Amino acid sequence: MTAPAGLRRGLGPWASASIVVGTIIGTGVFLKSAVMAQLGGSPAWVLAAWAVAGLLSLFGAMTYAELGGMFPSAGGEYVYLREGFGPAMGYLYAWNRFWIATPGSIAAYAVGSATFLGTALGYRGGPVIAIAIGLVAVFTAINCMNVRAGGQLQTALTAMKVVMIGGLALGALAAPAGRWAHLTVGGHGFPGASAFGAMVLSALWAYDGWNNLPMAAGEIRDPVKNLPRATVIGALAVLAIYAAVNLGYFHALPFAEIAASRSDAYPDAPPIAAKVAAQFLGGPAQAVLSIAMTISALSAMNGSMLTGARVPFAVARDGLAPAALARLSPGAGVPTIAVVVQGGLACLLALTGSFDQLTDAVVFASWLFYALNAGSVLLLRRRAPGRPRPFRVPGFPVVPVIYVAIAALLLVNTLWTAPWASALGLGMTALGGLVYAGFLRGRARPQSDAADG
């Protein structure tokens, strides 16, 4: 392999938008409402948690849209933190992204895909992990071909997914046995700050992915225009889809049925979506929904693979990671080694932890830095007021300040409610800090945006 001058800008506006929508909508919308119902005790609080998580994610997407227009280069959040807080903070983000967030997301999506496929084909247990690893291997190979192939696959998978989820929402809202009275049952008292925070954390897994597109900014055509537009429009589209789906769930099923759906507490129960589809599809519902959920998870996994590998590429190009991670394949112009290493780490993580443990670890590790990225918008408005900003955060500075404050509260709550995930995220961050301080301080050689082609 050689190291050509830059990446290939092969992602157009449709592929860019499909990465946003396709990476956000994965497994959470089919599974997380059960856990949230167990914690919240009533439909009203579950819907409130979805709304808070959705608004928080939209605020985050708007901050990233401003940053993406300013710095349209590969690496996304790594570049933003490097510019806002310096190379050390950028490196800590990249360290967490490389070791936990991206491979953890890929592993969770792969395990979810294999689990959903097992429901359709009638297997469970051991084969789930083997098939999950096989899926990671296949999609890793596809993403080593070229970015256009990965983008085209993402567009196709996202289109299929949106059509199927839209059908699920419409069917649930029109289910003959459905009752709007279902939304009024259950306890109405506030479940407590700790429980509500855990509910929001669960919903945030379903929204996670709005931050992925900027990682591949070096491969987007006309990124100054297409990156902010795709990020914000994609996030708004997912908000609307999730609102319709969750209203449909509570219309179609009694609250107790939703709370007793598949989760760590009810591992053998059908997913909520399968129960809902049975209300209007009858016998074939389980198989149809299993295929739909498999496609949805595969779409999110592919989007995470395509974008995630660009972070170690950008870090290596700055001299803070092995140079091999910055090498591009001569024909495809893809950081193939970064893609393959990322896939290998995902396979290792797929062998450990449950779905909910994996997703909680990913969300906590990610939100450690989402808040800092929003803070960099505040810093850069003061430090670099003259830099072109094709998109500006509406309601500045209120939106980023609210985002940072709520994210900080969420992280504090997660330290209490999900100690395993918190310990993993904090421990890996501390380890990254030791590596940077001991071996890498002063070695950063930040590349210009122009290096991306």
Image (cartoon, helix red, strand yellow):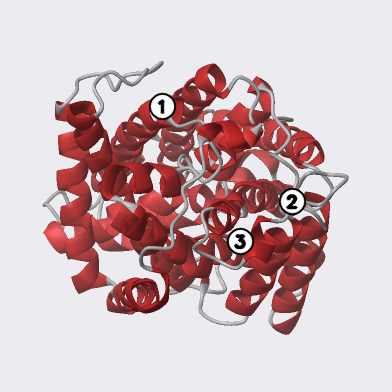
- The mark lying in front, picked from 3 and 1, is 1
Q: Is residue 54 above or below residue 66?
A: below
Q: Of label 3 and label 1, which has the lower sequence position?
A: 1
Cβ–Cβ below 8 Å for labels 3 and 2? no
Q: Residue at x 76, y 77 (%)?
A: 130
Instruction: Judge from the rendering whether residue 247 lies leftward or rightward of residue 345; answer left or right.
Output: left
Q: Please state the horizontal and vertical placement of residue 230, each as a whole percent of the image.
A: 53, 24
Residue flagged by tag 2: what amino acid is it?
Ala
Q: Please state the horizontal and vertical placement of residue 401, each as a whole percent of the image.
A: 15, 36
- The mark lying in front, picked from 3 and 2, is 2
Q: Of label 3 and label 2, which has the lower sequence position?
A: 2
Regarding residue 63, the answer to whether it shows in the image is: yes
Residue that carries the numbered disc 2 in the rendered image: 3
Most foreground residue, 431 or 348:
431
Residue flagged by tag 3: what amino acid is it?
Ile
Q: Which secondary structure lies at badge 1?
A: helix
Q: Residues within 10 Å of mark 1 (few under 14, many from 20)?
A: many
Residue that carries the numbered disc 3 in the rendered image: 106
Most foreground residue, 356 or 312:
312
Q: Please state the horizontal and vertical placement of residue 121, each as a whole percent of the image.
A: 81, 65
Q: Please state the horizontal and vertical placement of residue 212, each as a whole percent of the image.
A: 52, 43
Gap in Å between the C-alphas at discs 3 and 2?
Answer: 27 Å
Residue flagged by tag 1: what amino acid is it?
Met
In the rendered view of the protein, which quadrant contains the N terminus? bottom right
Q: Residue at x 51, y 37 (%)?
A: 448
Residue that carries the numbered disc 1 in the rendered image: 70
